[in-house]
Amino acid sequence: MSQTATTHTAGDHWARRFLPWLFDAGFAPTVILIMFVTMTFKSDVFLTTRNMQNILLQTSFLAIAAFGMTFVIIAAELDLSQGSSIALIGVITADVMVKNESIFLGVLAGLATGLILGLIIGFVSVVLRVPSFITTLGMLVMARGLAREITSGSTIGGFPESWMDFWQYKILGLRMPIWSALAVGVIFHIILRYTQFGLRVYAVGGSTEAARRAGINVTRVRLAVFLIGGLALAIAAFTLLGRVNSGQPNAAVLTELFAVAAVVLGGTNLFGGRGSIPRTLAGVLLIGVLKNSLNLLNISSNMQDVWIGLVFMLAMTSDLIRSRVIRYTALIASGEKSDAQSIKKDLINMGSIRTLEKKT
């Protein structure tokens, strides 16, 4: 009996310590580690410096968009217009910059466009109370249509040389798009974790009613979150322009889906109240490593779409599994075995944690 009790105690201790970490902050890093080990044996190119830099460069603009999405999702909102908004901001920036031969005016126009888009989405979603899911779906179509109308479906090139030189410039071997993503990540992390505004974002996403009772202006916080999201999209558009050297109306397709997947895979609660910028960065790197690995393995474009689709499905289901695991381990710690047994059965039925069949 004592040996059985000891086994149960050790098993419960392991479950309380390891499983919440694995299905929360440790999920994306663990998957990335597995992929790194696998690709080391599958490809001689994967671990080269050039390929690592390529992964960072390819994911730089996605990282910036995902950082903005992190604020939005933590506040229990959603933005499905990111890809189209980036394309619209990009072509407006390019058009103004080329026609006026002014980098300053182009950047100013891009920033203004991003903030205006964020303000429109925020006003309709927060003030008029149209669900952000519906609002941003409408903006997704509108922004893409405006981008194509402005350019007549063609690309805009001919940027000033100083603009192109800036984005090609390297510091410690890394190009400026990568440093831009890192700078935005650091600034957004500080805002989210170490300011009163960041605490209010978490409070609003965790419980709107509790936030109101605490004296937080929920409307103002959610409007600000969409403005931050719009600002992030403007910077992402600049980064993309600097990488491809042209304004394209069909750029950044499906960016919003990749951003949501990165945020959720990184451990942010899809329904608000929990998450962080470092976790989102881990989710972005997971997607970047996956796409790079599929290319190196010569997987056809059709099958790449299948794998990416699986990633989206995993992202959407991982949040549910994560919540159930955390709840299960919390019940074990509090001694509520009957409820823990019920949750454990749900997890096993979902096929997420087979090893729990031997517990309790």
Image (cartoon, rainbow, N blue to C red):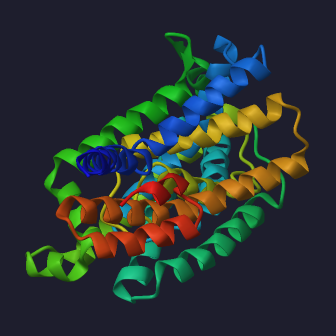
Q: Is residue 120 left or right of residue 94?
A: left
Q: Decide: is 134 above or below 102.
A: below
Query: Which one is nearer the viewer's eye here, 109 or 177?
Result: 177
The image shows residue 192 at horizontal and vertical percentages of 26, 50
Q: Nearer the viewer, residue 185 or 281?
A: 281
Residue 42 image point, x, y percent = 78, 22
Quadrant, the C terminus:
bottom left
Q: Nearer the viewer, residue 34 or 302?
A: 34
Residue 102 visible here: no
Q: Is residue 229 above or below residue 165?
A: below
Where residue 117 sits in the image (x, y, percent)? 49, 67
The structure residue drawn at horizontal position 42% and vertical position 81%, both measured from the top left corner, is 125
In this rendering, is residue 96 above or below 182?
A: below
Q: What residue is at 69 percent from the left and 58 percent from the top?
A: 254
Please name the residue shown 44% across and 66% down the image: 270
The part of the image, by quadrant, that contains residue 354 is bottom right
Q: Is residue 249 left or right of residue 14?
A: right
- Could you tell me how many numbered marks the image carries? 0
Quadrant in which residue 58 is drawn: top right
Point out the residue furthest to the left here: 214
Q: Is residue 271 above or below residue 93?
A: below
For residue 51, say whether it is visible.
Answer: yes
Instruction: Pick the residue in front: 137 or 44.
Output: 44
Residue at 81% x, 53% y is 305
Horizontal relation, residue 93 to residue 78: left or right: right
Quarter of the rendering containing residue 142? bottom right
